[in-house]
Structure formats: structure tokens, C-alpha cells
Image: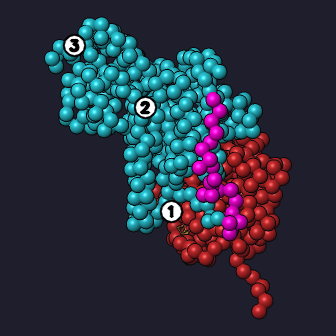
Amino acid sequence: MKQLMKGNEAMAEAAVMAGCRYYFGYPITPQNEVPEYMSWRLPQVGGVYKQAESELASVNMLFGAGAAGGRAMTSSSGLGISLMQEGISHICACEVPAVILNVARGGPAIGSIQPGQADYYQMTRGGGTGDYHMIVYTPGNLQEACDLIQLAFDKADQYRNAVAVYVDGCIGQLMESVEIQPRTPDPKYQDKPWAATGWDGKSRPKARFTSVFMDAAKCEAHNDHLQEKYRIIRETETRLQCVDTEDADIVLVAYGTTARICTSAKRMAEKAGIRVGIVRPITVWPFPYRQVQEACAHAKAVLCVEMSAGQMLDDVKIALNGTKPSYLYYRLGGMMPAAKDICREIVRLNEEVR
Amino acid sequence: MAVIYQKSAYLNDVKRHYCPGCSHGIAHKIVGEVLEEMGLLEKTIMVAPVGCSGLLYDYSNTDGIHALHGRAPAVATGVKAVHPDKIVYAYQGDGDLISIGTGETVSAAARGENITVIFANNSIFGMTGGQMAGTTLVGEKTSTCRDGRNPQVDGYPVGVCEMLAPLQGAKYIARASLHDVPHILKAKQMIRTAFEYQLNNRGYSLVELLCACPTNLKMSPTDACRWVGEEMTKTFPLGVFKEE
Ligand SMILES: Cc1ncc(C[n+]2csc(CCOP(=O)(O)OP(=O)(O)O)c2C)c(N)n1
Ligand code: SF4
Ligand SMILES: [Mg+2]
């Protein structure tokens, strides 16, 4: 059944319906409705809500709950995610499932509370130490955000890794019509013999979570193991949506709400007789490099549109690998690009590359 | 042949890396004895710190989780949320607990988390080579206060038990010392009480153990123990600070 819901509350409910039973978080706009919702909703289903004293604490509570075998999540916005970085690299190094929702605002630092996408580097490159990665989903609307939050829990279990859902504040704050279905946790990964549950000394190996290796060779071997996992994720977990890219002269690359605005810009530009395609990455780590290059094969130029100053453009350039000229249009600090401005950019670019 | 003494089933045979005279080994031993005597070994989940005792999960026959530096109370909070019926305890050094981890410590105590913290206070950052800690005594020489801790420059040591006891969520707060056998036996009794508090869902419990780090004190093990007994106890008086 479809309901009209505020984004943050819908995403929280979707998590509960996917079996999330533990939530740890610290208030920050524009995601406050997530902890508020969880605080009364989780006890109804036998779960636990904890208001942490900081994001440092919330990510480490998340780590503890995940290591103990719980289906757990946290949410925050850019600044709070900054404080979590050491914890995220530890979660990935210790191979603990965890789900992290970033409802992003304008940066840098405290920035603004309006929607932003400037946490792209933070989410895809991370600020924690070492060669770790988390899967990062970038839904384009609230329904997709709810579906991907639910998927995130299964992927976190499957790979025993942190999985992030990264939305701009627009998706968190707007009311939209959504359908939230219960999602049974994937039974393949629900047996967790590795979890810390108390050890009887015989029925399974001792549960042990650490990111410390006193011996560099052992540390390298652990890294190799992680890299092998990331290789499989890169090969199998990329997602994107391509619209009218086959015969487009100009291909727009955008994610989240920006991609939605690009759809209007595309319509406007088409009225002016320009063939426009849109590539929308739904995972930004792993980034769908090969698919983006293929989708741009026919284009004369590629225009990256983002609410950050060319952060995703780096990945688009890696994808294009010099095969096509790439351009950038952006707004910053919580300001959103307007469709007419993107359209003007498309028209200008079309002249330039003709 | 009759066995009259053996190490607790909590400890395995992995080679320890501790210096001669280090108190961490004694602390692990008595924690293990208490858990075994109380029949709790199989239901215990241990959270280890960053510091010299950071490899505790490899020395103990319990499930173990290594927390980042200072975050053990937050990790223990997460574990306990999932397993309220298990015994969850964090072992932390003074750098871990009262330098980098003050926020997590105070907040876990204030929330009244039903966890137990074993706090090994050796007045110094052992692992990183003997720098000043939140618990370094006034006048104590360390590698970052070479002429001795000077309150004018370095401020004062923190009494963790004194700080935590007034918090309503903190239910059992006690300080013992590991410098000689009678005190070790007293420490063991306090550790037992702390785990009983957790077992009976009474809330946050912490036992501070005054420990010797002979290496960084640059003393023999015997002198280091004497120093703990004679000097450390002046700044950190022993006893039960709260029992509620
Ligand atoms: C975030 C972070 N900062 C600094 C360190 C370096 N470090 C490792 S152990 C330690 C001090 C440990 O001292 P204490 O907790 O007193 O334990 P001890 O070795 O004395 O038992 C420090 C500063 C670290 N591992 N992580
Ligand atoms: S440096 Fe100090 S605390 Fe660390 S093992 Fe040696 S004696 Fe123990
Ligand atoms: Mg110390």
C-alpha cells in the first residue's frame, strides 16, 4: 500500500521492515526524523534505540552491535560522518556488517542545512585509514531510497562490510508517496557463526574482531583478503540507470535529486532539438566505470552535474579515460541546480562541440 | 598428583608480550578467576582497548572484540544492546579510558549501561613509550614531562572513581591496587562484586586497578610495586566509592 511519508521517516521504517533492530545515533539536521522515529518504533518490535553522546560513539556502538550479530544501523549528516571515519575503517577491517545512512547537507564543515552532495569524496574515498571501501548507494528518489536501505542490510551481511546509503537532504525532507514492504533478511547470511555471542570453547571457533596485526606480513595478507572481497564487489555490485543514452549527443551524469532535476533539463533541451541522455549511478562505490563509458559511447560531450565542485567528475573522467570531453555544472553550499540552468549549459555545450 | 594451583580456564597458552613485572597479567588472571568461579566464562563477551593490553582477546578463552582507542564503552554498549543476557566487560588502560575516551566513559556510566569496566591505571601511556597520561601524578616524570608533571603546565591527574561515583547511572565504583598479594585479593573481591552487579542488572560498574609499569617508570618490578603502593595510592586512595 502506498503512503505519503516524510523521507527520513520512510527510510527509518524501511530499515525496521528489513529487520533492523538496533539503531545508534546523534542528532543532526537534516536527518533528525530518523533517530526520532527509531526511538519509539524500535521498542515496538523488540529492538533497541540508543542516543549516543557523539557520532564517535554511535559508530562504535554500531560496530559492537554488528560484531555481536545484530542488524544495526546509524544515520547522520556529513559532519557526523566525518567523526565516524576511524570507526568505519575499523568496521571494514574487522569485517563487521553495518549500515550507515548519510542525509547530506551543504559543506564544508558546518556548512548549511540545505541539501548537498559534497560528501562524495567522503563517502567513496573515505577519511579513515588504509585500503578499505564501503558499498555506497545513491538513490534517486524516496522509493528507491527505501528499497536500497533494505538491500543494504543484506549486502552488509553478505560481505560483512559497511554499506552506506547516501542521499541529499531533499530526499530526507520531502514528503513522497512510498510503498514499504517487509523484507525478510536473506536466509543465506543469517547464520552468523563468527558473531560474538559468548563462547563455549567447542561448538565454533572463538569470535575475534580486530584490525591490529603486529606482523606486517600478516597485515598484508589480511589486506589481500579484503582486496579480493572488494574485487568481487566491483565486479558484481555496480548499479546505474541509463536513459536515452544510445543516440544522445550530450550525456548528463548525475545522481540523487540532481539526476531528477536533470530529467526536467533534458526535456527542455529536447524541445530545442538536442538529443540528451542521462546516466545515473546508483552505486558510487563501486562506481560503474565500464557502464558509464559504454553509455557515453555515442555522445559528443559528457556533462557531469552535481552539488559539489567536480567530485564525481573525477570518477566520470576515469570512466571516460580520455575517450570523450567531459564538462561540469554544479551548485554548492546547499543550493540546488535549476533545470533551466542545466538546460542552458546543455545548449551552450551543444554549440561548442558541434 | 593433586593439582593445588592452576591458571584459570579464562587464560590460554598464547605467549604474552608483557614486560617483567607488568600488572596487566595479574589483572587478567584475577578477572579470569572471578569469571570462572562465577561460572560466567561461556557467557562473557570481552572488549579490549588500544594500549599494552590490546591483545587481550588473544590471551583469553572468551569471545573478544578489539575497540578503537578510547571507544570500548561505546562498543560494549552496542554488544550489550544485542545480548542483554550476556556478561559484557571492557578492559581499559588510563590513556584509553580517561585521555581519549573520557566522553564514552562518562556517557556510558551516565546512561547506566549494565556493563563492567576493568580500568588498569598505570599512570602512563605504556604502549607508546611512557608519555604523560590523564592519571600521571604531580611530579611524576614521563617522556613528555621530563622534569615531572607540573600542574602549572600540565594540569592535574583525574580521579576516575571520584569523577564517576556521583553519576546516578554508576552503581558500583571501586578502586584497588595490584602492588602486593593482600591488595590483589581485595581487588579480586571487588571485581567479583562488579560482575555480580551486572549479573543482577543493577547498572554500570567499574573497578579501577592501580598497576605497575616498571618499564616506563624505569624501575625494577619490586620498586615499581613499592611506588604504586606508596605513591600512587596517595593521589588515588583505595576503597569502594559507590555501592548502590
Ligand atoms: C586514535 C589513536 N590515537 C593514538 C593512538 C596511539 N596509542 C596507542 S596506545 C596509546 C596509549 C595507551 O595508554 P594506556 O591506555 O594507558 O594503556 P597502557 O599501554 O598504559 O596499558 C596511544 C596513545 C592510537 N592507537 N589511536
Ligand atoms: S610497557 Fe608497561 S604497561 Fe606495557 S607491557 Fe611493559 S610494563 Fe606493561
Ligand atoms: Mg596506561
Instruction: Say whether residue B133 is left or right of residue B198.
Output: left
Q: Colour of chain B?
A: red
Place of residue B225 in the rendered image (x, y in percent of width and height, measured from the top left): 64, 72
**Marks 2 and 3, Cα distance to the nearest angstrom?**
28 Å
Q: Are marks 2 and 3 on the same chain?
A: yes
Q: Residue furthest bottom?
A: B1
Let me know if residue B194 is in the magenta part: no
> For the magenta stretch, what is the residue range?
A181-203
Where is residue B60, by image quadrant? bottom right
Near mark 1 (Cα within 10 A), the count class, few <14, some 14-19 or many ≥20, is: some
Q: Secondary structure at mark 1?
A: loop
Image mark for residue B148: none
Q: Secondary structure at mark 3?
A: helix
**Marks 3 and 1, Cα distance to the nearest angstrom?**
61 Å
Q: Earlier in the sequence, mark 2 or mark 3?
A: 2
Image mark for residue A282: 2
- The three-letter amino acid code for the residue at tag 3 is Arg
